[in-house]
Image: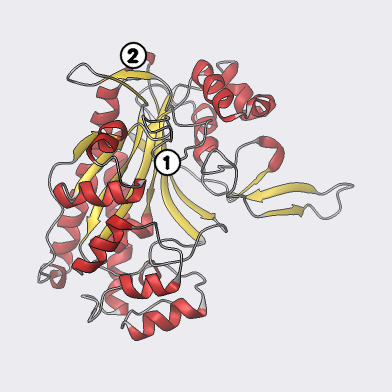
């Protein structure tokens, strides 16, 4: 798969199924059969959620699939609003049916839920979130159906810093690393694999430093390049405009704080209190994102970020008003992709091997040719 790495460093992200066919591995054979896979998924999800709650001081709560448009609670995933949610009217018998949306993530709802469940600093919630994201190119690791452990934790003002962010990231990585050891023990076939285990430690790098290392590469290719050196990284400061005039990636303006000035351990000024965990996937030979997370905006940084993105009109919405009026706790939170994490730890080539959703016929035919068993 060396040619895949080279192409990945040189060109844009996946946009055609010819590229998907080239990327998916030849000679693939799942280490677990379909029945074993289902048993492993169940065991792995229970283990990971239980240990995530222990590591971060969380308890499990129910989470909505549908919210009203007027609440402002839906996640638009980026700052330009190009990924729009599924919308429908509901409420038979009402004079005017409610205008509702299927959630794309529970990012904003969780922070309000901290108030609902009376969480104090050090306490938090974990959800088994299901969502629909209709505006993805559907390939081996992007699906219209999304499942996440969406979590949120109340914090104190003095914890809004890089040190606390890194402490939390290390705790999450410890859970993921430990879950890999657990599932390999439970299903010895996974031990027989020649694929390397996850590294015990994450490498932290700021998006600005990553740009300085690879100034001529686009964002995804920079990530691919750093993962050749460090197979598990946390990239800090996603959303802030970097030295080349662009953010590392678009990030919505009303949850993660990507504008707050910070100082690196060696004294350099940076921005942002958020980031992503990415790993090198040895099966697909590509970058693989597991989680996006961050310390959340204050009323000051919310206004500043919305001004940068030209979305100050959001401030009239109930969620944003709650932040402006100090009605909900300061917090840190994120979403860990369930199927993405399971796909990685079970050494699968495709999300469709661990979750059931819709896939284009063309992609299904590619998977058949590649000996990839997609669930129906």
Q: Quadrant of residue 272?
A: top left
> Does residue 107 appear to the left or right of 220 in the view shown?
right
> Relative to 282, does residue 24 appear above or below in the rendering?
below
Cα distance in 3D space between marks 1 and 2? 27 Å
Q: Counting other residues with Cα less than 10 Å from the Cα at mark 1, is it few (<14), some (14-19), or many (20 or more)?
A: some
- In the image, 256: left or right of 51? right
Looking at the rendered structure, the secondary structure element under dot 1 is: loop
**Please, what secondary structure does the residue beneath circle 2 have?**
helix
At 26% from the left edge and 52% from the top edge, which residue is drawn? 224
Residue 44 position within the rendered picture, expressed as x and y whole percent measured from the top left: 28, 59
Counting residues from the N terminus, which is met first, the one under dot 1 or under dot 2?
A: 2
Question: Which residue reaches farthest front?
Answer: 216
As drawn, the label of residue 249 is 1
Q: Position of residue 218 (x, y in %)?
A: 35, 47
Instruction: From the viewer's perspective, tell me whether residue 51 is left or right of residue 97.
Output: left
Q: Residue at x 54, y 56 (%)?
A: 133
Please determine whether, in this image, residue 123 is positioned above or below residue 326.
below
Residue at label 2? 158
Structural crowding at the residue carrying mark 2, measured as other residues with C-alpha within 10 Å and reported as few (<14), some (14–19) or many (≥20): few
The residue drawn where x is 53% and y is 23% is 302
Check the picture and name the quadrant holding the N terminus.
bottom left
Depth check, front residue: 62 or 130: 130
- In the image, what residue occupies the spot 64% across and 36% down? 72
Nearer the observer: mark 1 or 2; the answer is 1
Q: Total of numbered circles in the picture?
A: 2
């Amino acid at each position: 798969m060396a040619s895949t790495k080279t192409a990945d460093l040189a060109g844009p992200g996946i946009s055609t199924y010819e590229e998907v066919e080239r990327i998916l591995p030849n000679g693939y054979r799942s280490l677990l059969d379909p029945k074993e896979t289902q048993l492993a998924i169940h065991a792995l999800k229970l283990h990971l959620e239980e240990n995530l709650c222990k590591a971060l001081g969380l308890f499990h709560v129910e989470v909505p699939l549908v919210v009203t448009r007027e609440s402002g609670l839906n996640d638009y995933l980026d700052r330009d609003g190009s990924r729009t949610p599924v919308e429908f009217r509901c409420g038979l018998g009402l004079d005017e049916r409610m205008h509702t949306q299927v959630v794309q993530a529970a990012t904003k709802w969780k922070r309000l839920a901290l108030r609902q469940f009376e969480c104090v600093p050090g306490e938090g919630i974990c959800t088994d979130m299901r969502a629909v994201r209709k505006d993805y190119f559907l390939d081996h690791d992007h699906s219209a159906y999304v499942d996440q452990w969406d979590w949120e934790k109340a914090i104190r003002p003095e914890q809004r810093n890089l040190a606390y962010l890194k402490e939390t990231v290390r705790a999450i990585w410890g859970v993921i690393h430990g879950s890999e050891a657990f599932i390999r023990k439970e299903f010895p076939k996974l031990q027989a694999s020649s694929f390397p285990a996850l590294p015990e430690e994450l490498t932290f790098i700021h998006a600005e430093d990553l740009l300085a290392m690879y100034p001529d590469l686009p964002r995804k290719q920079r990530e691919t390049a750093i993962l050749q050196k460090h197979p598990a990284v946390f990239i800090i400061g996603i959303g802030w405009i970097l030295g080349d005039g662009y953010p590392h990636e678009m990030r919505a303006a009303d949850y993660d704080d990507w504008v707050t000035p910070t100082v690196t351990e060696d004294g350099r000024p940076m921005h942002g209190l958020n980031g992503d965990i990415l790993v090198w996937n040895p099966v697909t030979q590509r970058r693989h994102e597991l989680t996006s997370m961050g310390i959340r905006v204050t009323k000051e940084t919310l206004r500043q970020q919305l001004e940068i993105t030209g979305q100050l009109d959001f401030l009239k919405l109930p969620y944003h008003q709650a932040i402006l009026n100090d009605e909900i706790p300061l917090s840190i939170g994120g979403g860990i992709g369930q199927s993405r994490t399971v796909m990685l730890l079970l050494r699968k080539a495709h999300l469709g091997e661990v979750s059931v959703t819709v896939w284009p016929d063309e992609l299904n035919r590619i998977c058949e040719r590649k000996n990839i068993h997609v669930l129906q």
